[in-house]
Amino acid sequence: MPSTDLLKEAERVMTICNACRYCEGFCAVYPAMELRRTFSEQDLKYLANLCHNCRGCYYACQYAPPHEFAVNVSKTFAELRLEIYSNFTWPGFLAGMFRRNGLLVSMITTLSVAVVVLLAFVLQGPAVVFSTHLGENAFYKVIPYWFIVIPFSALAIYVFINLLIGSINFWYETGGQLSELIDLRANSQAIKDVLQLKYLDGGGHGCNYPDDRFSMVRRWLHHCVFYGFLLCFASTTIAAIYDHFLHRGAPYPFWSWPVMLGTVGGLALLVGTGGLLYLKWQMDTVPATARAFGMDVGFLALLFFASLTGLLLLILRETPAMGTLLAVHLGVVAGLFITMPYGKFVHAVYCYAALVRNAVEQSRGGS
Amino acid sequence: MSNPEQIKTDVLVVGGGNAALCAAMTAREAGAKVLLLESAPKDFRGGNSRHTRNIRYLHHRGNDCLTGPYLEDEFWEDLLQVTGGQTHAQLARLTIRESADIGQWMNAHGCHFQPPLRGTLHLARTNAHFLGGGKALMNAYYATAGKLGVEIMYEADVRDLEIRDGKFEAAIFEFEGASQKVRAKSVVVASGGFQANLTWLKECWGEAADNFIIRGSPYDRGRPLRVLLDHGAKPVGDPRQCHAVAIDARAPKFDGGIVTRLDCVSFGIVVNKNARRFYDEGEDFWPKRYAIWGRLVAHQPDQIAFSILDSKSIDLFMPSVFPPVEADTIGELATKLELDPTALEAVVTEFNKSIRPGTFDPSILDDCATKALEPPKSHWARPLDTPPFYGYPLRPGITFTYLGITVNAKAQVIMQDGQAAPNIHAAGEIMAGNILGQGYMAGFGLTIGTVFGRIAGKEAARFAIDGFA
């Protein structure tokens, strides 16, 4: 359960907002708030995850600090989200992962890179790693096929199950019914909201990020990350199909689906995460929580390095650097997967669940 | 600004709310050098415009944010109704006509509008709502003014104006603990009323003013208004009147804004500190009556009253910021509110007995009324009989004062001798009394501020550049 102080603060702030309602045009949080007169713990957890942190409401707020009401919804909800991520962590004993997330994520990633690189050198020997390998199955000469397929399949299944458990827990804990979670109309509305990043548009003019000016930049950068991630995911899936069903071993020629999708996706990720890191560097920290900084930066940096090492691997795959780069890239990707349920990535799951909930509520309220 | 001796500008704007910004941007666009002096710190800039939410303007057809047309005749009729005819017809007509499609101008200066949503549907056709409300509007205007090259000084408090032969020459202001002087070719005074000046309020209301709550900015102290009056500007509006509503007594002394309002009065009864009712709570729809309740409460002993409800009504009005005082019996509620339990029980019993059967309907003037009760409750009277019972303490909350400066159609200040000062202009709340002699109409203060801010900015720039009005 999130700390009582934080819930109390969120309740206090929402009570002020509900009496004001000037911000109802910015996002989904305020119309959802207006369906209530009081705010239970369940309501607050839901609203905090519905918040996309566009910060329009902070700069527009006549009660923002230094006003004595000191309303700072962006910060309050960011803090609450962090505690919620921690509370819904599975297995529970790993909840501490969210406390010093930036540090832990970078340590785990460094460790996983070290392990992969070390294994490659120890098992294959430097001669193999530093050789130039060309043609089909070149990658597997450095890291054997099953050493890639088995750990990554296991990791992917673990992450999937983990996040599924997290989202179902979240759904019940915020007072939802299972029938609503699988409601087709609500899900299609939520998917639409996600694909458009509807609530990072700040009511049509963009977020107030990194400062008080309205800007669509963050929304576009987030789109780059989101679609870049999906393209890389598609690239990997197609590559797996090529490998298992068409028996064509990686690497693939540049003008092939896996490489094209991976390249475009990787570049989008690079631009998106790089840009978001830059904005984070520039941002006004008052409507933010310092406690989430490590988590946010850690995840962005991880995605950045995953795409950077992937692109370098593509460029240098016909040189002796390929072996090392492949090991490093796989190590970073392994780090990404391992920390996925224990870092910023989980926002995707909870935010999606909140959007489904919002779609259910609004269609009910509207009918 | 390093050398105070050298501050010189074409147009000086005194004030930092909507009218001041409209004047500053317009004057700058006309080519004048503009300096704006805002008495508040940056975080609280914008005067009472920070607390606004929409603007009423004439438009011939609806758009994304307005559901239909609002034409001159209807606008004029609405104004006549709220002011009871206390308006300057020429200036009022000018305001209405000049407000035509003002939304486009606002848009071009950074304002974002939003479609009307819940709670304000009765204004959906006539008033355009700003995305995020008045502070967002102020942020946008300050950003635009900055981009245009308007110089802005915060915490710059104007203390005096140098006026010779009816002509403005310089202003004296306090800035960073020192007195400074700025020379300008013309001045626009757009510094609002004196509603946050407790001493001045006491001159009008006596000791009762100690118990008033100021709903808006603590920086609206009215010093430039006082200065203009002392220099012989002709006043307009009742010097003793203010727009006051009944708000939650627990509100902060200043700047509580919208969230402290209570819309519960018509659903229960209201008693004073002696547990006596004093006015018909159900006289008319609340939006038509809330503005009289500030004065009603101000006339009660210790300027306090209590709205008493039961659980049947607690969800019927907009939630407010402070939770109601709650109790299982009327006596217990009285004790918690520090009222005499026996007296309150007697009042409630008498009220409950006097109610004629009817069909309760908050959306119409229903037939739930009292019989042979003094004062009566004409509508929505239902017995207070379903615990828990609730109470909200009420105090007068002052929105704005009516006293202002007479102006002409060029926004020039009219002096006692009837002459217009060629280079002294006034805009916004400081001259709204010319048009709103009494009463109030939602979003119309901003209309006056925007229209006259633009006129004042244009005229002040013209004088500064051409050398004559």
Image (cartoon, helix red, strand yellow):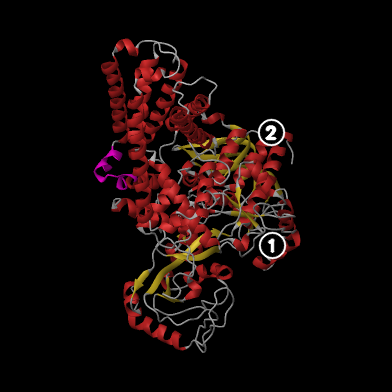
Q: The disc numbered 1 marks a residue on which chain?
A: B
A245 falls in the magenta region: no
Q: Which residue is mark 2?
A: B31
- The image's mark for residue B87 is 1
Q: The disc numbered 2 marks a residue on which chain?
A: B
**Residue A285 placement: quadrant:** top left
Whether B188 is drawn above or below A151: the answer is below
Amino acid type at circle 2 is: Gly
- Which x, y percent locates residue B218? 47, 52
Helix, strand or loop at disc 1?
A: loop
Give A349 or A87, whichever is nearer the viewer.
Answer: A349
Q: Which residues are magenta?
A: A85-99
- Which x, y percent locates residue B298? 47, 69
Q: Is B185 on the left-hand or right-hand side of B376?
A: right
> Do we see residue B389 in this rendering?
yes
All told, the count of numbered labels is 2
> Do we see residue B253 in this rendering?
no
Amino acid type at circle 1 is: Thr
